[in-house]
Image: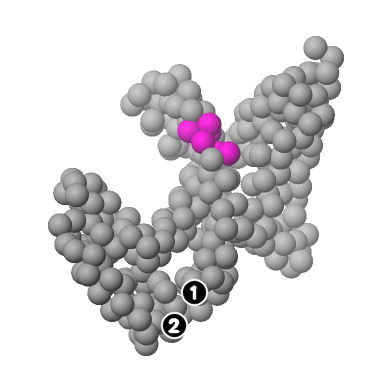
């Protein structure tokens, strides 16, 4: 029990201390504002997310095994709840005004809504792993087979803290969604290149084609039908990649200008 309490308190103090610093940094003039903006987008945001979400899950077990893991999890949950409470107290007018949490509590019930948002938190490590793949795996595909580069900071960034009167519970979970959707969208964009380059064949299930074409537009915009021939497959690959300088998916902005060259800066 002593180990659990010690690891938990150290983790809690470490997380709350950095959270407090995040509120102070923008008040340090131009340098503080610039650093704060850097932390709101990749790669600064990646460092911040790692510190608050997965670092305790690594450090805790290293220090004290399963007890350390449990203590770190409890400390992370307490950090969110304590920060939520304190942030609400610091913004009493917004806390008493119209709020997302209050409306949703009235629609589905307070405890249902409370538990549901914490259920979504379970997948944070999975999103972090996806993010690590975007940083460390995808660049190899850029180098090996000329996939397009992306300005990842244009995808992985947060800004909802600038929305007026978004406080406490609403703010922390909206920031989570802000980060999560950017990571997911960038991953989907990268997967479009993977699918169209290696497997430009429609799924045999029309329902799957219909369901996937929003995330993979090439399903109906270039991939060959499921009953086509291998010659059709190689022909579409030759057509789309034969003279391309960048092997992007077929609807990538690079193909809307000169083949393989974009007017936008898509560098990482």
Residue in front for this viewpoint, 158 or 61: 61
**In which quadrant of the rendered view does residue 18 lie?**
top right
Q: Is mark 2 on a helix, strand or loop?
A: loop
Mark 2–mark 1 CB contact (< 8 Å) = yes
Residue at x 80% of width, y 18% of height: 5
* Magenta region: 120-125
Q: Name the residue under label 2.
A: 245
Q: Would residue 65 be visible to someone looking at this image? A: yes
Q: Quadrant of the N terminus?
A: top right
| Left or right relative to 92: residue 31 | right
Question: What residue do we see at 38% from left, 30% from top?
Answer: 104
Sequence order check, earlier mark of 2 and 1: 1
For the point 26% across and 59% down, which residue is it?
201
Above or below: residue 39 compared with residue 79: below
Alpha carbon distance from label 2 to label 1? 7 Å
Give the image quarter of residue 27: bottom right
| Relative depth, front residue between 254 and 232 | 232
Give percent across and percent down for residue 262: 43, 82
Residue on which disc 1 sits: 146
- Residue 247, image x, y percentages: 42, 74
Colouring convention used in this rendered image of the protein: one colour
Judged left or right of residue 249, residue 137 is: right
Residue at x 21% of width, y 69% of height: 232
């Amino acid at each position: 029990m002593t180990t659990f309490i010690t690891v938990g308190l150290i983790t809690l103090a470490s997380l709350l201390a950095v959270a407090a610093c995040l509120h102070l940094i923008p008040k340090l003039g131009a340098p503080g504002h610039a650093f704060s903006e850097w932390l709101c987008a990749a790669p600064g945001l990646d460092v911040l997310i790692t510190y608050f979400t997965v670092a305790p899950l690594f450090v805790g077990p290293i220090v004290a095994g399963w007890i350390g893991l449990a203590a770190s999890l409890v400390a992370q949950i307490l950090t969110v709840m304590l920060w939520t409470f304190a942030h609400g107290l610091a913004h009493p007018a917004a806390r008493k005004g119209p709020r997302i949490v209050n409306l949703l509590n009235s629609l589905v019930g307070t405890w249902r809504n409370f538990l549901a948002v914490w259920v979504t938190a379970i997948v944070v490590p999975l999103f972090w792993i996806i993010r690590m793949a975007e940083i460390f795996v995808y660049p190899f595909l850029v180098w090996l087979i000329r996939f397009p580069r992306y300005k990842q900071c244009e995808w992985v960034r947060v800004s909802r803290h600038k929305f007026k009167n978004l406080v406490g519970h609403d703010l922390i979970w909206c920031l989570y969604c802000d980060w999560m959707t950017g990571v997911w969208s960038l991953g989907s964009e990268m997967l479009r290149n993977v699918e169209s380059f290696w497997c430009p064949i429609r799924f045999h299930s029309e329902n799957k084609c219909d369901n996937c074409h929003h995330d993979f537009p090439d399903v109906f915009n270039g991939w060959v039908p499921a009953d086509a021939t291998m010659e059709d497959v190689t022909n579409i690959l030759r057509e789309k990649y034969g003279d391309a300088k960048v092997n992007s998916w077929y609807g990538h902005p690079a193909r809307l200008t000169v083949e393989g060259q974009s007017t936008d800066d898509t560098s990482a």
